Amino acid sequence: MKYTFFLLSSLFATVTTTAQIDHAEFLEGPFSSPREITETCLLCHEGIDQDIMKTRHWNWLGDEFTSADGRTTRLGKKNLINNFCIAVPSNWPRCTSCHIGYGWEDESFDFADPLNIDCLICHDGTGTYRKTPTGAGMPDPEVDLVKVAQSVGRTGINNCSICHFNGGGGTGVKHGDMDASMLNPSPELDVHMGGLGFTCSDCHAGENHMILGASHGSMAAGTNHIACTDCHTEAPHRRKLINDHSASVACETCHIPTFAREEPTKTWWDWSTAGQNKRVETDEWGLPLYDKMKGEFRWDKNIIPEYSWYNGKASYYLPGDKIPSGAPLDLNKPLGDINDATARITPFKVMKGRQVYDLKNNYLIVAKLFGRGGYWTTYDWDSASRLGMEAVNLAYSGRFAFVETRMSWPINHMVAPAKDALRCTDCHSRRGESRINWESLGYKGDPMSHGGRF
């Protein structure tokens, strides 16, 4: 094991310290717009634009697939509903501040125009590049575009962190295992990034700008996964009994005992309480428990994950789907069960909340939150619902209420050192104490006591 890590760390150290080309002579400026920078980049990097325009980062959609009900579709951030800021349609300029493009203001955005590609967001080497939070992906006017353009080089953690560590409006809001603490983590927080000096692209970089890793679109299609065993062997432990667990248990289950270990993550968001003029209180970490624009929040830290069978796919609630009876509504549900040989017991952050739905049509509402007529301007759910549903071409009855929802986010980062991995007794105990609810996974009880799939 130590020898394997030495080889990997040596390899990645070589990759990440390769000399970079000084772009100062190629990008002299001045530039009247960021699109001029992209045009200049493509003079040397011919064809890169065509690669990028096929990617998930550009389209915000995963691969095409056929769902269980026979629908052929592509899913992703572009067209899914979440229980944070709900959905992209009608809220484009705010949401697309994290898009790798310029000017996605509405449904007319031209995904085929290569000059709309933002090369700087992923390749800035100054650490100063930033986008206007409500500017549809356009850079902050204060940014020195010439300085940033001349600094471009290999993607680093900081580039990825701008969007991926701050999704949902701030550090740790969405992802329980990606936040500002991962910019320069200790080995105890993450053995790969803190102990071995990995960057995000060491694991996630694919070919032709196709970033590897299962986002929600990829989970729906069951594609584009990366796994611990891509680098480690299928039997990395000295004890056969532990290696045998890999048939049923994901590596992350034992090696990420808790998430949000240094910074809290949001765990509850109640839109039904928004719009009130109430005094804002903070929790033990100084984080707000209420926001008039967004409602009530809960945060937590050092969280034990929830565990589900997972075969790499998930079913998703789609706009217009009827809400089944019983609460809460699962916006996405990891697929797999005890009888699925491809499934593993896998850790998730489960985000919970309450969001608006159409009381008569019995489906979730895509509400317009940002911009003219949006909820954050009017504090009127009726008009915000009408405008948002127009953007997704769904009927709105004029009657709304709120429903509790859940959303599962895989936990893959914050891999702890081996000494901090779970021990047998964390899941199997003669006293019946276990962090895993065995019955919910289809067992009669602890499989070490009753026999089972291990």
Image (cartoon, grey):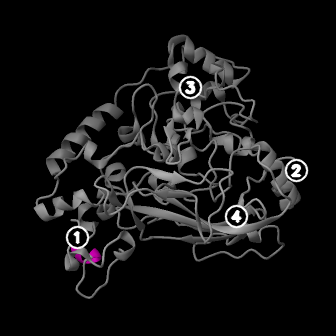
The CA span between labels 4 and 1 is 39 Å
Tag in front: 2 or 4: 4
Q: Residue at x 31, y 58 (%)?
A: 250
Marks 3 and 1 sit apart, C-alpha to C-alpha, by: 47 Å
Residue drawn 60% across the image and 38% down it: 128
Amino acid marked by disc 4:
Gln
Q: Kindly state the secondary structure of the residue where label 2 is placed.
A: loop
Q: Position of residue 272 (x, y in %)?
A: 75, 69
Q: Nearer the viewer, mark 4 or mark 3?
A: 4
Front-most of 238 and 153? 238
Q: Which residue is mark 2?
A: 373
Which kind of residue does numbered mark 2 sit on?
Answer: Gly
Q: Secondary structure at mark 4?
A: strand
In the image, residue 131 sits, relative to residue 364, either above or below, namely above
Q: Which residue is mark 4?
A: 355
Magenta residues (range): 423-427
The residues tagged by marks 2 and 4 sit, at their Cα atoms, a distance apart of 19 Å
Spatial distance from mark 2 to mark 3, Cα to Cα? Answer: 32 Å
Location of residue 237 (image quadrant): bottom left
Q: Quadrant of residue 399?
A: bottom right
Residue 449 is one of the magenta-drawn residues: no
Circle nearer the N terminus (3, 1): 3
Which element is circle 1 on? loop
Name the quarter where the C terminus is drawn. Answer: bottom left
Q: How many marks?
A: 4
Q: Are marks 2 and 3 in contact (CB under 8 Å)?
A: no
Whether pointer 4 and pointer 3 mark residues with C-beta atoms closer than 8 Å, the reply is no
| Marks 4 and 1, the one that precedes in the sequence | 4
Percent of width and height locating residue 276? 82, 71
